[in-house]
Image (spheres, rainbow, N blue to C red):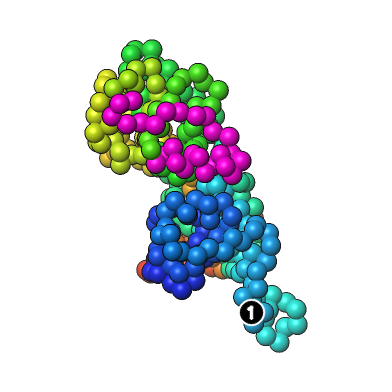
Amino acid sequence: MDPKRPQKRALVTHAHYDHLAAHGEIWASPATVELLKLRVPKGCRFRAVEFGEPVSLGKGASITLHPAGHILGSAMVLVERRQAGRGKKKSRLLYTGDFKLRHGLTAEGCQPVRADVLLMETTFGLPKYRMPPMEKVREEILDFCRTHLAQGRVPVLLGYALGKSQEILRILEGEKWPLLLHPTIQKIAKVYRNLGVALPEGRTLNASTGRRSEGHVVVCPPQALRSGGLQKLEPKRTAMISGWALDKGAVYRYGCDEAFPLSDHADYDELWEMVGRVKPRQVRTLHGFAREFAMDLQEKGIEAWALAGETQMVLPI
């Protein structure tokens, strides 16, 4: 599942590049398959696996995909296997992949299930990472756009091309501002619409449209900030949309004017909520602050270890 090195067959939980490799065959949810077609070589084979429908792996083992709430099509993987000598009793492992429990604007709602072992991502596994309410952040983003449009500046909203940019577009839905969209975001938005997610339309950002950007709101990936097309958007003001906006100095890290905390990942409280809803006997953590969160779980009497590296055992005194 989400292997970093090419495999003959791999299950991919969602279509972000950091979860991909040049696999021979990819199993994924139907929406993820459609998004992967934009991101993997054409020779790759796909098997679309519907949410909630178990797939046998043989020898008493099966997998079932459940929505993870991270981005459109993102999946958690429930692995079940009959235990030898125990009749029909099954052992259950839930791999979350990237997930969030908060309700997003463009992704399926997360649907955790009970499991004996929980293998979970812990990107925001420190107590300081608690996301503010969605409505508060939405109003801050809209106020940013209103303020700078009124002053004759071009608001540029920076968000990752897949997932975050579509959330930004839904935040802008209902406003009358014309939009300029980076070409990559334009392509992904087309796939989202084909999959039934309504998104506002916009013109494609290029050298020509960039020279006529007054009165527009621009949406583009953060890596495009210093591209030739964006250099023509003057005067402009930029805002990064990311959960890492909670860090002090985020505007300096991203080289932007403002930063707003909106994330596709579970925050610290949601990580705890996930453990409470799954009720596992054991927890394994990975990504982000895996060691720190595992130790927090240990302090509450939960058996937990980081999947990579070392986790110090917490001894009750």
Q: Position of residue 67 (x, y in %)?
A: 61, 53
Residue 252 drawn above or below residue 12: above
Q: Is residue 191 located in the magenta-colored stretch of the structure?
A: yes
Q: Is residue 196 located in the magenta-colored stretch of the structure?
A: yes
Q: Position of residue 173 (x, y in %)?
A: 53, 27
As shown in the figure, which amino acid type bears the numbered disc 1?
Gly
Q: Residue at x 32, y 20 (%)?
A: 212
Structural crowding at the residue carrying mark 1, measured as other residues with C-alpha within 10 Å and reported as few (<14), some (14–19) or many (≥20): few
Q: Residue at x 44, y 21 (%)?
A: 178
Q: Residue at x 62, y 75 (%)?
A: 57
Is 215 in front, or is 76?
A: 215
Disc 1: which residue: 58
* Left or right of residue 111: residue 193: left
Residue 190 drawn above or below residue 86: above
Does residue 184 appear in the picture of this structure?
yes
Residue 14 drawn above or below residue 198: below
Residue segment shown in magenta: 184-209
Q: Position of residue 176 (x, y in %)?
A: 50, 18
Does residue 112 appear in the picture of this structure?
no
* Left or right of residue 21: residue 65: right
Image quadrant of residue 192?
top right
